[in-house]
């Protein structure tokens, strides 16, 4: 009897759960399977039946008042997505997928938001570079994808790679994430953005200004979040790309995915090979055997990269789970010049970089109006430098072990938050926690190993005071095992009326000193660099103001104008100084910098024609130790892009242009005098044509990059940073190059 009662009870519970599930509907936006909150649903039926619904903050709506087994017509509307209409019966549909609207082109944002939100409704100043833009630019890595953006600059280092700056602040003040997981492995304070490949990227979201309340340290200048692809339109999708560029770049990548109603699995693999380049090299470069003379030395070092990732996503009406894993392996070779007198030997160096990362993400609905997010990740980074003494006649070599170095970093994170977002009430709330453990090991680290624990709590609330006006206030505070933290806060205001959106904000930011800056111990016959465990956090204040006007005329002409400005004040900046009356170098909180800028942007779209242009002026006023520049140094940037597609033939023409004005720089000469110098201006112009075949299953592209043949630009401020003491040239590009690519997209 007990067994029978148990079976009856379980069966009853099962049917009750089933009934509850079939009375709800989830609206999912493609291509990244984003649940759409506050989507409008209109249901019509027989006898003039009509009912309107809104999805909740998890994209779920309860269909009440409907009769089982009757036919209904459902219409779904959400900003940025095409209107979806379909017939259905109660209980026959659990999820509805809607496609992006190519006319409105308004992206949906997720970075630093309570929930997915249309760009015009975001509290943040966010720009989006989507997969179509990445493809049109023939972008190989993150530098390529952002190279046409205003207020973003890059610096090239022969050994450390490509550094990025935003709003006049260097890359150590900028946090870069992949699907919300911070990228680790800073060298010289910067992430090498040339190592972040665009394989399998859905879009890039760039937030200008501090996001320290959301993401903690290193987010003084802003946040870049790279969002990978998480869905496909058909059950099976296969993608393959071959790419060649004339200075010796060869790329091959492929991806395969499968999806069902609730499951999505994808994997990708890429190999990128660069043969190295110097100005004297021939225009078209192909791998070949070369004589071991001075031509073996390359200005841009050869490198080979392997990238692999795999992901799984489960989507239910009230729950989403994502699991990801990624492997990155790079080897860069620095071949030395043959040594006199016989030129038979040379010192060669290899720099090997490895990254392993894994993450798991949960998003769920607790009850009406309450949702939760949990992201857990682990990252491992290793960089080895190996030096060998090579016999160029026999190719035998001997390791020079005293010049080798290995640095390893590990980072583990759990970030969780709870959101209360009622459909019709004026106040929304988010509270969360952020737990981090970081470790660094290496021969040049004090005691060979140092670690840090950080535990932060953050919260914010959004107040919709009246129609169109929102105010958001946030606060973050916590514990750091190395130093006393101080709270950071932010306030954001947004007023939306008709076709205008006005945003203003004030935010505090901070950057925790790196474990290297605190615990570096590099002491030998030629070096004496030691970290400073007493370092404090860098701190900042940021203010922004912007207005955006957007208008559609006859649903064909899409105009947009944006005016915005910012101001940053960063103090207690960390820099490396020589200790007076000694040969010791260490890090101190002696610097400060102010940056400001104003920008104007305009875009226009008519069906398959798109034009965009913008101009920005930035000011910089640095101060460090005993030196102060008593004037604002300024520089200009401008950009433009034109894309046009002939619909009938599926031929696309794409042109991208950016002007980088004279950039101020400064250095201390051999007599200790402060000298203000500059880096010359230059222009970058890219053009390409792509042709689609077989219903866009095959896309062939050909184009030219850097048409003005920019390689080095003159600098009167040196190339070694703020304290450099000599002038010279700054690496910008590898001159004009031609490229071609062939892409296959198969859905079945």
Image: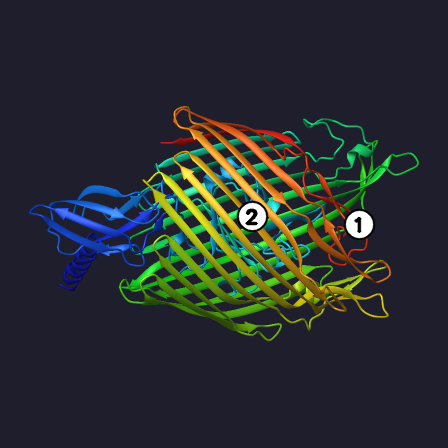
Q: Nearer the viewer, residue 173 or 399?
A: 173
Q: Nearer the viewer, residue 645 or 280?
A: 645
- Write down the residue under mark 2: 615
Residue 414 on image: x %, y % = 48, 63
Residue 57 on image: x %, y % = 31, 59
Separation of disc 2 and disc 1 at Cα? 29 Å
Q: Nearer the viewer, residue 647 or 287?
A: 647
Residue 570 on image: x %, y % = 62, 66
Disc on the earlier residue, 2 or 1: 2
Q: Residue furthest left?
A: 47
Q: Residue at x 63, y 45 (%)?
A: 660
Say whether residue 635 is left or right of residue 741.
right
Residue 208 visible in the picture? no
Q: Are marks 2 and 1 in contact (CB under 8 Å)?
A: no
Task: Give the position of the N terminus as an image quadrant.
Answer: bottom left
The kind of secondary structure element at disc 1 is loop
Q: Is residue 618 above or below residue 656?
A: below
Front label number (2 vs 1): 2
Q: Is residue 17 above or below residue 553?
A: below
Q: Residue furthest right?
A: 341
Q: Residue at x 26, y 43 (%)?
A: 84
Say whether residue 516 is left or right of residue 41.
right
Label 2 crowd (10 A; few <14 / some 14-19 / many >=20): some
Residue 404 on image: x %, y % = 76, 51
- Write down the residue under mark 1: 727
The kind of secondary structure element at disc 2 is strand
Label 1 crowd (10 A; few <14 / some 14-19 / many >=20): some
Task: Give the position of the C terminus as an image quadrant.
Answer: top left
């Amino acid at each position: 009897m007990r067994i029978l009662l148990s079976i009856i009870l379980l069966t009853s519970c099962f049917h009750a759960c089933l009934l509850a599930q079939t009375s709800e509907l989830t609206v999912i936006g493609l291509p990244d399977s984003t649940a759409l909150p506050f989507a409008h649903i209109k249901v019509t039926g027989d006898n003039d039946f009509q009912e309107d619904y809104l999805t909740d903050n998890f994209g779920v709506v309860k269909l009440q008042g409907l009769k089982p087994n009757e036919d209904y017509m459902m219409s779904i509307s959400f900003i940025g997505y095409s209107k979806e209409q379909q017939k259905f019966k109660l209980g026959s549909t659990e999820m509805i997928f809607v496609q992006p609207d190519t006319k409105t082109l308004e992206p949906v944002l997720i970075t630093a938001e309570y929930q997915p939100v249309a760009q015009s409704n975001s509290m943040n100043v966010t720009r989006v570079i989507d997969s179509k833009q990445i493809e049109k630019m023939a972008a190989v890595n993150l530098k390529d994808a952002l190279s046409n953006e205003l207020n973003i600059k890059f610096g090239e280092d022969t050994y450390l790679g490509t550094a990025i700056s935003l709003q006049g602040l260097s890359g150590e003040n900028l946090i870069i994430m992949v699907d919300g997981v911070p990228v680790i492995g800073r060298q010289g304070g910067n992430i090498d953005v040339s190592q972040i490949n665009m394989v399998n990227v859905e879009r890039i979201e760039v937030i200008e200004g501090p996001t320290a309340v959301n993401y903690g340290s290193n987010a003084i200048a802003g946040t870049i979040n790279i969002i990978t692809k998480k869905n496909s339109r058909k059950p099976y999708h296969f993608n393959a790309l071959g790419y060649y560029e004339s200075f010796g770049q060869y790329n091959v990548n492929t991806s395969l995915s499968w999806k069902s109603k609730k499951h999505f699995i994808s994997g990708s693999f890429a190999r990128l090979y660069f043969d190295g380049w110097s100005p004297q090299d021939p225009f078209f470069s192909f791998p070949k055997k070369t004589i071991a003379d001075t031509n073996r030395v390359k200005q841009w070092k050869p490198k080979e990269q392997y990238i692999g990732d795999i992901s799984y996503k489960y989507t239910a009406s009230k729950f989403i789970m994502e699991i990801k894993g990624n492997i990155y392996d790079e080897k860069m070779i620095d071949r030395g010049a043959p040594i006199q007198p016989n030129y038979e030997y040379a010192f060669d160096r290899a720099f090997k970089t490895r990254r392993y990362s894994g993450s798991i993400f949960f998003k769920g609905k607790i009850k009406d109006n309450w949702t939760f997010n949990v992201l857990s990740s682990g990252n491992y980074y290793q960089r080895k430098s190996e030096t060998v003494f090579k016999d160029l006649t026999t190719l035998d070599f001997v390791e020079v072990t005293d010049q080798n170095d290995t640095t390893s970093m590990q980072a583990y994170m759990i970030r969780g938050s709870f959101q209360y977002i009622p459909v019709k009430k004026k106040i929304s709330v988010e509270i969360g926690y952020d737990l981090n453990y970081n470790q660094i090991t290496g021969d040049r680290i004090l005691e060979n190993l140092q670690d840090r624990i950080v535990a932060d709590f953050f919260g914010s609330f959004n107040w919709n005071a009246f129609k169109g006006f929102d105010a958001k206030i946030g606060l973050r505070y916590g514990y750091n095992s190395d130093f006393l933290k101080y709270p950071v806060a932010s306030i954001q205001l947004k007023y939306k009326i008709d076709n205008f959106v006005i945003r203003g904000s004030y935010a505090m930011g901070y950057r925790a000193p790196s474990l290297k800056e605190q615990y570096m111990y590099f002491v030998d016959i030629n070096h004496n660099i030691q970290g400073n465990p007493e370092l404090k956090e860098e701190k900042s204040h940021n203010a922004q103001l912007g207005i955006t006007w957007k208008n559609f005329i006859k649903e064909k002409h899409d105009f947009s104008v944006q005016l915005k400005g910012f101001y940053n004040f960063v103090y207690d900046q960390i820099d490396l100084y020589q200790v007076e009356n000694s040969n010791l170098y260490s890090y101190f909180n002696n610097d400060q910098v102010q940056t400001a800028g104003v920008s104007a942007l305009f875009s226009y779209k008519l069906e398959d024609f798109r034009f965009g242009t913008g101009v920005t002026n930035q000011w910089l006023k640095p101060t460090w130790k005993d030196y102060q520049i008593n004037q604002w140094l300024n520089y200009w940037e401008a950009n433009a892009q034109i894309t046009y597609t002939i619909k009938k033939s599926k031929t696309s023409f794409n042109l991208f242009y950016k002007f980088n004005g004279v950039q101020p720089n400064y250095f201390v000469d051999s007599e200790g005098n402060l000298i203000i110098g500059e880096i010359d201006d230059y222009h970058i112009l890219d053009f390409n044509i792509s042709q689609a075949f077989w219903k866009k299953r095959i896309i062939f592209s050909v184009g030219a990059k850097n048409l003005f043949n920019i390689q080095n630009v003159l600098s009167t401020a040196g190339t070694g940073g703020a304290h450099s003491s000599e002038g010279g040239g700054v690496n910008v590009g590898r001159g004009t190059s031609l490229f071609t690519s062939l892409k296959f997209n198969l859905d079945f």
